[in-house]
Amino acid sequence: MPSAFKPAAQAAAENAAAENAAPSLADDSKGGSIRALRALNFFIADVQNGMGPYMALFLQSSVGWGPAQIGSALAAGNIAQVLAQTPAGALIDRLRQKRSLLLFGIALIATAVLATAFFTTRPVVMGGQALIGVAGAVFPPCLAAIALGLVGRQRFDQTQGTNQAFNAAGNMFAALALGAVGYYFNLRWMFYLVGALCVGAVLCVARIKNDDIDFDLARGADQDDAGEDVKKDESKGATGAPSGGVWDGIKELLAGFRDLLTQKPVLVFLVSAVIFHFANAAMVPLVTQLLARGVGAKQAVLYTSGYMVASQLVFMVVAAASGRLAGKLGRKPLFLFAFGALAARGVLYTVSHAPAALIAVQCMDGLGAGIFGVVGVLIIADLTKGTGRFNAAQGAIATAQGLGAFLSNSVAGYLAKSRGNDFTFLTLAAIAAVGLAFFWVMMPETRDQTPGPRQPAAA
């Protein structure tokens, strides 16, 4: 039947079906890049944090450093990451060569771990931790941007959940592999293993096709949910990339943050991220100290691997489920559940300090972290829809997380020394409860957020 004689309802149904089918066809053509991105999330999890919690064990048992020296070295990485997060997000928004940025971060990790393995002097270790911190600021927003650019908004929920599940699987593999190598061989061999895993990450990056990544989608500049196409301003070039020199980029960055921070939901989520990590970050170091108390270095490695594997197994399941549930239930209920699980976890740590009990409670870390890792990115994508500042906002939120983690470790360290571990765990649980109440009252549901203002064209 000619289209002119079709009933309006039938025509509308066919148009809707065509729109729903379009992403599937696009995803089929990009299947190789999507699969490579999943594998990259697996390998990045293995190398992203360098040695992670094993670094302190290595410096203490193999190098003979004291707590103050170890703390200063790890602090160098934390400070570098906090300082790099916001600029990294803004750079990802403006940079089309996102694969090159990933390769640069992997090179920083490889350089840091191998240099630390061969030269355990204070400047080399602190410098290596700083490089790892900078790389850690690049990976999460860049991977999320590539995922959004590959699949678009319609499938971003599920894709982000799947990618985080692969990331958790990579963390599990790293915990098992590093634990085995540290236990059966010299602890220094763990650095060589991380260097070898960097090679796998590079191969995964090479399999992602740059042409498959939609530049405008990757920075949140689309307004497809509003039924509008992204306009290709001549001043931005054919790809929609912002043009201009360094000063223009700085002015655009400042204007972007000014626009973001004038939105109440963005500010509320920033504060919520600080509170969440204030309550969460210090729990793992405290548990590690309790597990390692009175045992040798090799036993401490096994305990650390045990609780990391347990929590990442839960993380993997929760992350995959969160990507699906966030589109059905909304973002807010899941995030409230994450706060509740964090508060309960802090209380349960005080029930027993036996290794089996601590590892069992540590499984709950995967609940909060799995939801935050998926739903947090979805909330940012909702709040920055149509602005072109998705990655800059990710950087700002990551900076808030770093601030919360810094406060958590500083306050918890003082409280644990003066009032004991149980009092510290209960204090962190109380902070999580405050965050739950704050998020419940102040944060709106963002799943159906209307698009924000378009990014102004460069002069």
Image (tube, grey):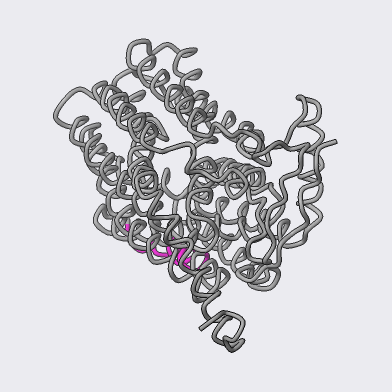
Q: In this rendering, is residue 113 above or below 18? A: above
Residue at (71%, 45%) from the top-left corner? Answer: 232
Q: Position of residue 372 (x, y in %)?
A: 50, 57
Q: Is residue 383 magenta?
A: no
In the rendered image, the residue lying farthest to the left is: 184
Relative height, residue 248 to residue 327 (above, below): above
The quadrant in which residue 208 appears is top left
Q: Is residue 350 visible?
A: no
The stretch in magenta equals 339-352
In the image, residue 347 lies in the stretch drawn in magenta:
yes
Q: Is residue 15 left or right of residue 94?
A: left
**Magenta segment, prevailing SS (helix, strand or loop):** helix
Q: Is residue 369 above or below residue 15?
A: above
- Residue most extreme to the right: 459
Q: Residue at x 52, y 40 (%)?
A: 142
Q: Can residue 362 be seen in this view?
A: yes
**Residue 257 location in percent, x, y?**
76, 45
